[in-house]
Amino acid sequence: MSRHPFRLAPLVIAFALSLVLCSPLARAQQRHASTAAANVPTPQSMLGFAPGDDRTIADWAQIRAYFARLDAASDRVRVETIGQSTEGRPLIVAYISAPENIRNLARYQEIQRKLADPRLVRDDAERERLIHDGKMVVAVSCSIHSTEIVASQMALRLAYDLATAQDEETRQILQNVILLLIPSPNPDGIQIVADWYRKTLSTPYEGSDPPELYHHYAGHDDNRDWFMLNLTETQAVTRLFWQQWFPEVVYDIHQQGQTGSRFFVPPFFDPPNPNIAPLLLREVGLIGHKIAADEEAAGMQGVITNALYDTWWHGGFRTAPYFHNSVGILTEAASAKIMTPLPVTKEQLEHSSTRGMDSALPKFPTTNFPDPWPGGKWRPRDIMKLELIAVHSVLSLASNYRERYLRNFYALGRNALNSEAGSLTYLIEAGQGKDENVAKLVGALVAQGVEVQRLERELHVRDYEQILAGSSPPAREAPANSYIVFLSQPYAANVRALFERQVYPNRLTANGEAERPYDVAGWTLPMQLGLEAPLVYVTEPAAQRRLTLIRDENDVRRDLGLPLRQGTRSPLANPITRPVRLALYKSWTASMDEGWTRYVFDTFNVPYQTLLDKDVRAGNLRAHYDVIVLPSLRMREIMEGNPAGRYPAEFTGGIGDAGVEALRRFVEAGGTLVCFDASSELAIKQFKLPLRNVLEGLKSSEFYCPGSILRLTVDTNAPLAHGFGRDVDAYFINSSAFDVTGDGGGRVHTVARYADKDVLRSGWLLGEKYLAGKIALAEVSLGQGRVVLFGFRPQHRAQTWGTFLFIWDAISKQ
């Protein structure tokens, strides 16, 4: 027996446990728990249907009402409002855990704060106490993309199950884990989709997406805002995560197309971002394979790993955690038609391919796709089952390995406090003349937990890139009131990922075509904001530095003499220098570029009117407007809009030939038509302007630039370049470059060109020769008016503050 003591341990534990469970106190606790669970309402009792039932949908008001009932009925659940949506709806989180944990949330929040920042931990003994006492914090977010609706419905079922289950495994999970369940970080979108779905039930349009953005400004791009923090929703969740709770795991639940794999889980596809700690990549893979194995064990087919979605890009819900020392998980279930089942044929599966798989029904099983789904009817309930299994997998791992996760989380933060980096900092130098841009940059950094400090007196610094190159640059003076961001801080990975230049690997397919990244390839934040922020080495020792920690954006605005932010109204002044009757075209194809343009106008308090297809077709535009802006939309999308039969007639048809003629007459009568990126095609081809897009028709093996920052050379004497220097960084996302043809009408004035060489600043550019020296921004006269053609996105996702001034100049010029 002494040689095998471990064999007796389970029996001893089981016997002891049976004595405890048979005690009068234990029996009383069980009776109390059963009674409490019986008082918790089921979702069906409130909704009149079970979440996930075919052709039913719970809207945001119903979801919120159910969570409020759970909060009142269960001591395992506490619901908190963490902010408001863009349209004013409450944004909620449900804390779900054991009753004793719920009663002591403040204590566990403080433990998390210390584990996230090892500088707050006195010694090894305190670290061990924190790890021993702490709980695993797991955040689960549902349906940020609101047409991917099932997860928000699943959240009701998940919360009920955790609030009522009495099995030992659930009790252990609740004891070891604090779940932060976000039913949706996009309440407005949930309501929009639910209203549209109910309106179109039993019509030919049942199961279609709404013909409007399902976030007021961003639509699908609401999950592209996690470092810029433009939206109120991302601001609220960021505050919850990186200033209050510091979760070890963040799980973001999505849906994908209808005819691909049934369920994607990590590990992700290559390439990974070099700033993600290798340990985090392994932890992502571990959780993903656990999910996949549990799905297989439950008989779920069509689960794929290591495909399509990569970890290169920063700005998503599940990617931002990597740069905060947390594990980010994404799953993507195949979609139904909102909440309507649909048949999926074998042929559809055989012709659906993506990165990491040739088809969703391969001829032979593969390691990353061992059990393909053969086709059949696909229901919302199938999606819900996949998601419930996946959440349980995450929670069970978090519970069983609580101490290990907490220890690794602490270690990642400690490792970032590198003494060798103690004098390395990014310098946002005072006196750049772009105070609003500086305030935006510093405010966004501080909001996501990055430490930024202001110099109270001068510091001497040396250029670190020159040092790395082997030279010995002279020390120079960084002036007082500059801002510095040291690399020795817990979120150093976040600092590097936002400030450094991205160099995306040159990834080509077997036939030489460019392999498309999941999102964009480059996003360097100071470049997008038009600011200089070099990495420098501070020569003074720490004791001689006089620094003040910045707490929020208003600290910076006060320092710079800018109006302070109060409430939800933007303090930014209208930059348009003359009275302008401005209109922004809005297509029923739900253009995100249109939404972001509205956001920029609203943020800078620029008055405008929305121009719909019917308004354009009606003509007589010059009588009402001086300037019309077309967001980035292809010519066909503007002219044809949604096809007939997909939506009711009022949402189809585009502007048509009549609308094109109305726009031409508007310009010829003295109006200004401003075309962003893809919409330049309509003006060039339909107005027969003497320009052509030199990139049109090129294969991706010849030219490819998916979301990157490029260098422009600007004619500083041009009226549309007022306030710019010779070199400007601009955002290019499979955009345009122009050449003068000599054919057609109008006189062309070139405002900016892509640089003659070294065009790429950050990201990936394949085929620079096709782009270098070509026109990036042009003004073309036509009749008494003019057309302004942007080859790039001057307002891309409202991140590109460095090129906003081009927009104001284009609108303001007489």
Image (cartoon, helix red, strand yellow):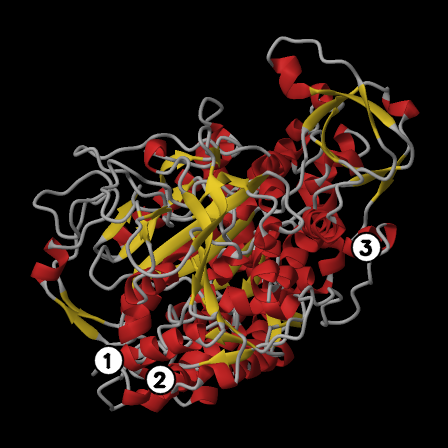
Query: Who's the residue at 91% across and 36% down the image?
Result: 456
- Which of the 4 image quadrants contains residue 489? top right
Q: Mark 2 and mark 1: span between their CA atoms?
A: 21 Å
Q: Nearer the viewer, mark 2 or mark 3?
A: 2
Return the mark for residue 557. 3
Is residue 25 toward the left or the right of residue 366 in the image? right
Q: Mark 2 and mark 3: span between their CA atoms?
A: 45 Å
Where residue 642 appears, x then y in whole percent? 28, 76
Q: Mark 3 and mark 1: span between their CA atoms?
A: 48 Å
At numbered mark 3, what does the secondary structure look like: helix, strand or loop? helix
Where residue 114 appears, x then y in whole percent? 74, 42
One can see residue 618 in this view: yes
Query: Who's the residue at 43% across and 77% down the image?
Result: 666
One can see residue 673 in this view: no
Residue matched to label 2? 617
Q: Which amino acid does label 2 sit on?
A: Arg
Where residue 25 appears, x then y in whole percent? 65, 66
- Which of the 4 image quadrants contains residue 509? top left
Determine contact: label 3, label 1, CB under 8 Å: no
- Which of the 4 image quadrants contains residue 609? bottom right
Which is more N-terminal, label 3 or label 2?
A: 3
| Residue density around tag 3, few if under 14, some if 14–19, many if 20 or more, within 10 Å | many
| Residue density around tag 2, few if under 14, some if 14–19, many if 20 or more, within 10 Å | some
Q: What residue type is labelled 3?
A: Arg
Return the mark for residue 646. 1
Query: Which quarter of the image is occupied by the C terminus?
Result: bottom right
Where residue 319 appears, x then y in whole percent? 50, 47
Query: Who's the residue at 41% across and 90% down the image?
Result: 48
Q: What residue type is labelled 1?
A: Arg
Which is more N-terminal, label 1 or label 3?
A: 3
